[in-house]
Amino acid sequence: MGTGTEDEEDWRPIWPTAEGSDDPAEGWRTPWPPMANTALRAVSEIIEQLALNDRHPNTPFLAGTAAFWLIAIHEGRRDRNPRYDKSRLANPDGRVLDGLTLARNAVAHGQVIVSRSEGLKWPLQFPMDFGPWVWAPSREWPWRPRPSRFLERQQESYAEHFAGKLVAGPLKQALVCLGRGHESTSSRKV
């Protein structure tokens, strides 16, 4: 602390309050957790790799890594600002983080959270391509999350923002929410 690094002193907007106020007292500014900018840059590179190659051989590992770092930043902000969740949930784009939290928890319990089509077509063609990586529906995970007051919201968010979608899109939406929370991804292709 006090070294003057970008990570320590940078304050970025999260989500404006429902009234649109940008007053820090209204709860929409939260200091970055330490190393957040470095983590966001690294996650941005992971997402770029996944967006450029939706058949990337390391997709399961890259998706899990991105989920862990994005949720670490999200939780760091929540811990630093008691108004953060209320502001975040007022923005529909902020809800993607609930589904990502469920995905991160699944990875922490050893689940592979992405899948590819396993169907074969005739005639067989080589090399075989099983299609792009997508977020696996949570009902396909052998792991079942422990009940909590957040679980229903997490499951709804995962079903809406993740299940069956190409891997890079929801990660990019979460990155935008955390990195530039004042912008909405709803009207843009993610």
Image (spheres, helix red, strand yellow):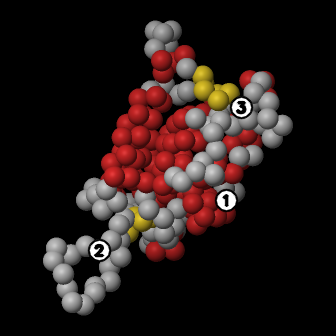
Q: What is the three-letter code of the residue carrying label 3?
A: Trp
Which disc is residue 89 wearing? Answer: none
Q: Quadrant of residue 152?
A: bottom right
- Identify the residue shown where x is 33% and y is 48%: 49
Distance Cα–Cα, label 2 vs label 3 = 43 Å
Above or below: residue 79 compared with residue 138: above
Which image quarter: residue 142? bottom left
Q: Nearer the viewer, residue 25 or 142?
A: 25
- Farthest-out residue, right: 19
Give the vertical position of 163 relative to 174 (above or below).
Answer: below
Q: Tell me which residue sits at (45%, 68%) in the image.
A: 136
Pointers 2 and 3 in contact (C-beta within 8 Å):
no
Tag 1: Cα neighbours inside 10 Å, few (<14), some, or many (≥20)?
some
Q: Residue 153 got which mark?
A: 1
Measured as percent of width and height from the top left, residue 91 is found at 71, 46
Question: Residue 140's x, y, as percent?
Answer: 46, 74
Which residue is label 3 attached to? Answer: 28
**Disc 2 target residue:** 130
Q: CA distance from mark 2 to mark 1?
A: 32 Å
Residue type at mark 2?
Phe
Query: Are dots 2 and 1 in contact, CB under 8 Å?
Result: no
Callout 3 environment at 10 Å: few (<14), some (14 to 19), or many (20+)?
many
Q: Is residue 43 left or right of residue 162?
A: left
Residue most toward the left?
126
Give the residue displayed 73% in from the left and 35% down from the top.
16
Indicate which label's residue lies in the foreground, 1 or 3: 3
Q: Earlier in the sequence, mark 2 or mark 3?
A: 3
Front-most of residues 188 and 50: 188
Write down the quadrant of residue 109 in the picture: bottom left
Horizontal side, residue 74 vs residue 131: left or right = right
**Helix, strand or loop status at disc 1:** helix
